[in-house]
């Protein structure tokens, strides 16, 4: 198993880029893939993942486990994830603070949870179960949301911090999601950063979003915007550098666009790390 | 207690059915108009993801009916058969049956068979890689035992029988296809789907080859499979077919059951 250094920057590996990534072998700290794209027995995709893991540390990012479904955890889905984790031996495994369906229905979207004691208790039990099944700790990511629940009595970051304290899981801080929610619901994202301690942050995500009718929508289909870069810089100052991912899933651009974004992220992370050292020695 | 379950059931109801929007209202902050706008964002995301997944599983069908029509078809399917898996690659298994009943595609009667073929291709893509095997061992089997042999087939191998030339339709819609685009609609085709290395291949089968493979895939012994093939086509050439299937590793082993 390869580990990911704190200053590492990676990109999401998507099928149209497989060949170019293998041929050019760009200097990246890690590659992240969606776990569900590799719930397969064999074939071209599994072969590509084998090639990727021979050259880079791998992060398995799940989008379909639906940890927060109140009725049941999908055991069959968890079993497939376990098989993949055993096969790939990834450096990181992550999922979301979300639910995707109830009963037999699956929406295949990351629906937000109400931030309540009941949700925290449920998620604690689920994260415990996933970590004991996978025999490793996982990271849980904050999600973009387009509505808020009346019953929420804490912030998402406070819930994540408590979840991490109870289960030993880490936090995958999606800086773009935090920014999207800050705009959609009118809060100060920097105050939310203060609710998280540096040692629980295991990874950060950067992505682009779009805007429609006064609502920011997380699309993973655009460059990282200026405000999100600024928030990332602040996060690096507070948390120190953490493995950081450029996430791009829709309207996939040329690989070089992703690599340029990765270079920007690496510069910001390195600068903030240097400043942190200077402050410590001052 | 169990408020969360109630909340999720209400929200799911509102996301699934636009007429049930009021169910979500009591849980969400903001006014009715805002909540409806935001629910609409999620509904659009959900529909787009499922439509994209169907388009990825049925790329030829999508070309045949056109993108705009396919998107409508996909939306109609989602209304009847919602996703039940956290892995969208599982979504669309019942699409062939849905297309067979859909009133506006009745003028394209081959679509359901084409859909069955594409689902078989979709499944073959991620099937287990075939293992290397010792073909010499086959020659060691005593002639008297040969008809009792059962072949092992590479994962992902399947046949799709049709009254239409579906293998031909599939082939001419592949991006790498070169040549004439004509289709002889009077031809009935049984299509063979195989994984050859990492590539999924589709080929039209003659009646004898189709009967042999269908019987053998279903577990029949070599002798019984060959009898069925000869009944379907007196000119069936077993040696030629086996040579082809073994070279491409579609037949990837055998069981020599000594008790038979």
Image (spheres, coloured by chain):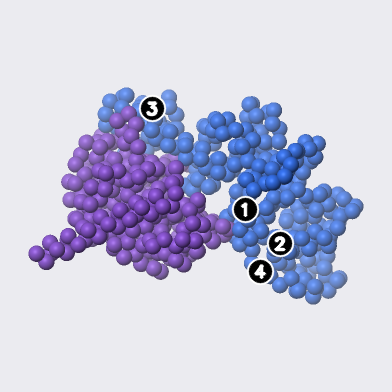
Chain colours: A purple, B blue
Q: Chain of mark 3?
A: B
Q: Earlier in the sequence, mark 3 or mark 4?
A: 3
- Same chain? Circles 1 and 2: yes
Mark 2 = which residue?
A: B248
Q: Residue furthest right?
A: B234
Query: Where is residue A244 shown, x and y percent of the image?
Result: 32, 56
Q: What kind of element bears circle 1? A: helix
3D distance between C-alphas at marks 4 and 2: 11 Å
Mark 3 = which residue?
A: B21
Mark 1 = which residue?
A: B124
Query: Where is residue A26 shown, x and y percent of the image?
Result: 41, 61
Q: Earlier in the sequence, mark 2 or mark 3?
A: 3
Q: Residue furthest bottom?
A: B140
Compare residues B208 and A48 and report the one nearer the observer.
A48
- Badge 4 local density, few (<14 within 10 Å), some, or many (20+)? few
Q: Chain of mark 4?
A: B
Q: Earlier in the sequence, mark 4 or mark 2?
A: 4
Q: Quadrant of the N terminus of chain A?
A: bottom left
Residue beneath the point at 31% across and 24% down: B32
3D distance between C-alphas at marks 2 and 3: 55 Å
Mark 4 = which residue?
A: B132
């Amino acid at each position: 198993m390869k580990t990911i250094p704190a200053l590492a920057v990676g990109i999401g590996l998507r099928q149209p880029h497989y060949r170019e990534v293998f041929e050019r072998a760009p200097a990246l700290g890690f590659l992240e893939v969606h776990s569900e794209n590799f719930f397969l027995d064999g074939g071209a995709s599994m072969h590509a993942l084998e090639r990727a893991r021979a050259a880079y540390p791998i992060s398995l990012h799940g989008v379909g486990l639906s940890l927060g479904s109140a009725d049941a955890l999908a055991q069959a889905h968890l079993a497939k994830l376990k098989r993949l984790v055993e096969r790939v031996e990834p450096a990181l495994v992550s999922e979301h603070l979300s639910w995707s369906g109830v009963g037999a229905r699956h929406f295949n979207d990351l629906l937000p949870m109400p931030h309540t004691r009941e949700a925290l208790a449920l998620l604690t039990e689920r994260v415990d179960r996933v970590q004991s099944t996978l025999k490793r700790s996982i990271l849980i990511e904050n999600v973009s949301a387009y509505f808020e629940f009346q019953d929420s009595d804490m912030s998402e970051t406070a819930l994540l911090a408590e979840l991490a304290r109870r289960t030993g899981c880490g936090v995958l801080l999606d800086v773009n999601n935090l920014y999207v929610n800050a705009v959609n619901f009118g809060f100060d994202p920097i105050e939310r950063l203060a609710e998280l301690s540096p040692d629980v942050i295991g990874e950060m995500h950067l992505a682009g979003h779009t805007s429609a009718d006064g609502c920011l929508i997380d699309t993973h289909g655009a460059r990282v915007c200026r405000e999100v870069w600024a928030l990332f810089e602040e996060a690096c100052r507070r948390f120190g550098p953490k493995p950081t991912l450029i996430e791009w899933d829709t309207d996939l651009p040329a690989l070089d666009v992703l690599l340029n974004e990765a270079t920007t992220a690496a510069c910001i992370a390195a600068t903030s790390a240097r400043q942190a050292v200077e402050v410590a020695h001052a | 207690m169990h408020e969360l379950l109630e909340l999720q059931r209400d929200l799911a109801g509102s996301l699934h059915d636009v007429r049930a929007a009021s169910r979500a209202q009591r849980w969400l902050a903001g006014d009715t108009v805002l909540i409806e706008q935001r629910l609409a964002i999620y509904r659009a995301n959900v529909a787009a993801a499922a439509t994209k997944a169907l388009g990825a599983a049925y790329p030829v069908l999508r070309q045949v009916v056109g993108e705009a029509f396919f998107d409508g078809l996909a939306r109609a399917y989602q209304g009847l058969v919602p996703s039940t898996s956290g892995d969208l690659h599982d979504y669309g298994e019942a699409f062939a049956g849905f297309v067979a009943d859909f009133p506006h595609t009745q003028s394209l009667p081959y679509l359901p068979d084409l859909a069955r073929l594409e689902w078989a291709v979709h499944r073959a893509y991620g099937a287990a890689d075939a293992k290397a095997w010792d073909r010499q061992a086959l020659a060691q089997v005593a002639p008297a035992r040969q008809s009792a042999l059962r072949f092992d087939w590479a994962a992902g191998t399947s046949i799709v029988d049709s009254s239409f030339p579906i293998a031909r339709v599939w082939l001419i819609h592949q991006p790498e296809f070169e040549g004439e685009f004509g289709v002889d609609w009077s031809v009935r085709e049984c299509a063979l789907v195989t994984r050859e290395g990492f590539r999924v291949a589709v080929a039209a089968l003659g009646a004898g080859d189709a009967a042999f493979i269908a019987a053998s895939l279903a577990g029949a012994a070599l002798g019984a499979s060959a009898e069925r093939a000869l009944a379907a086509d007196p000119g069936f050439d077993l040696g030629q077919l086996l040579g082809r299937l073994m070279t491409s590793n579609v037949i990837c082993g055998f069981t020599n059951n000594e008790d038979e």
